[in-house]
Image (spheres, helix red, strand yellow):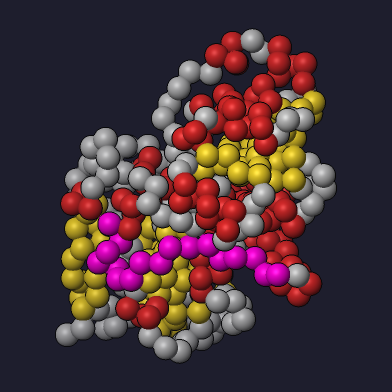
Amino acid sequence: MNESEIVRLASVPGREVQPTDFTVDAIEDQSAQTLRAGQVEVEAEFFGLNAGLRSRLGSGVGTTLGPSIGPGDTPQSDTVARITRSNDDDYAIGERVMALLPWRSTAIVSTQGLRRLDQATAPIDAMTLVGHVGATAFAGLVHVGQIGSGDVVWISAAAGGVGSCAVQFARALGATVIASAGGDERTAYLRDRLGVGRVVDRTKGLEAGLDEQAPHGIDLYLDLVGGDHLAAAIPRMNMGGRIVVAGRSGPKTNYPVLDDSGILIGKRLQIIGLSVTDHADAYERVNKLVKRVAATAEPFVSAATVIDGLENLPQAFCDLLVGKVLGRSVVRTAAGSQPR
């Protein structure tokens, strides 16, 4: 009997998530299970991990990306998978698709939740530039942030999954990019791998670094951290500035600058929350941008740290939460490692 693996939450995490908060179990293969009309069986090849999942683990609180996850439940991530069986005439065996799928080797899903993957698109690009994180970056900059050529744009957590896409997109759209991250390795990655000229190392003084790199203020801030980063951004925004809040990875803090709301009125500032689930067309639009740039200039970098083996997914997720990952954290399964 063939077996596949499944990752489940074993216990409610403490202050820090540990690999032992999960179990990796063998489950029976589903090949004998009959597919209902409009269903396919898929074999997962690549899982893209998101730090925002942390807020749903044992919290009893859901988000726009899904419900709370309790012990015994299987988390989900955006996934590149290949169809192995189909009961939908529009989806053929062997096609590669993207979907929000559970952390398991194989799954039976409705085709309503699938997006076909262009045969010319590499799976790693689908996990980064034209996938969930790329669409989030694009929606934040374009749909919500209304980025304009010549804007000064600050992107925090810029060495992560969304941030690494955002710095490249913003530059291609004509903006002056300021990118921040923590530590020598991550800031060097921004300069050397992603080609960012204005870099701030938050561990060496966030506010002083911003004053040095943005002496004339900031027009658009893509906030992927919150906390002290948001507080630092507000007084440095230019007239009509936009702050798009797309993530929180920093500790909670007070916002004393908001005690005087006059700065928001005086500068006509906008602070807007973003969920990519509200911007379904961002996937198509970012795909067009990626193809246009590849045809006319140096292609974008698919920034990712790839870890092999579904059994290593819990450790990969924990590494992501403590900043050990450059670019997006991607787990490649045994199926994804097979030559095609």
In magenta segment, residue 301: yes
Q: Which residue is drawn at 17% across and 85% down?
A: 1
Tell me where residue 115 sits by quadrant: bottom right
Q: In this view, does 172 lie to the left or right of 41?
A: right
Q: Give the range drawn in magenta.
A: 298-315
Placement of 108 over or under 327, stated as above or below:
below
Front in this rendered view, residue 78 or 174: 174
State whether residue 259 is above or below residue 58: above
In the rendered image, which quarter contains the C terminus? bottom left
Q: Toward the viewer: 63 or 306?
A: 306
Q: Is residue 274 visible?
A: no
**Which residue does the image show at 58% across and 58% down from the upper left?**
192
In the picture, measured across the screen, residue 277 lies left or right of residue 185, that is right
Magenta span contains residue 149: no
Instruction: State the image coordinates of residue 54 (x, y, percent, origin top left).
Output: 36, 44
Give the residue furthest to the bottom.
340
Would you place residue 286 above or below residue 278 in this image? below
Residue in view at x 64 percent, y 57 percent: 195
- Could you tell me residue 332's position as x and y percent? 38, 71
Answer whether residue 90 is visible to the viewer in this image: yes
Where is residue 37 shown, x and y percent of the image? 45, 77
Q: Nearer the viewer, residue 306 or 27?
A: 306
Using the rendered view, name the quadrant where residue 265 is placed: top right
Residue 310 image position (x, y, % from top left): 29, 68
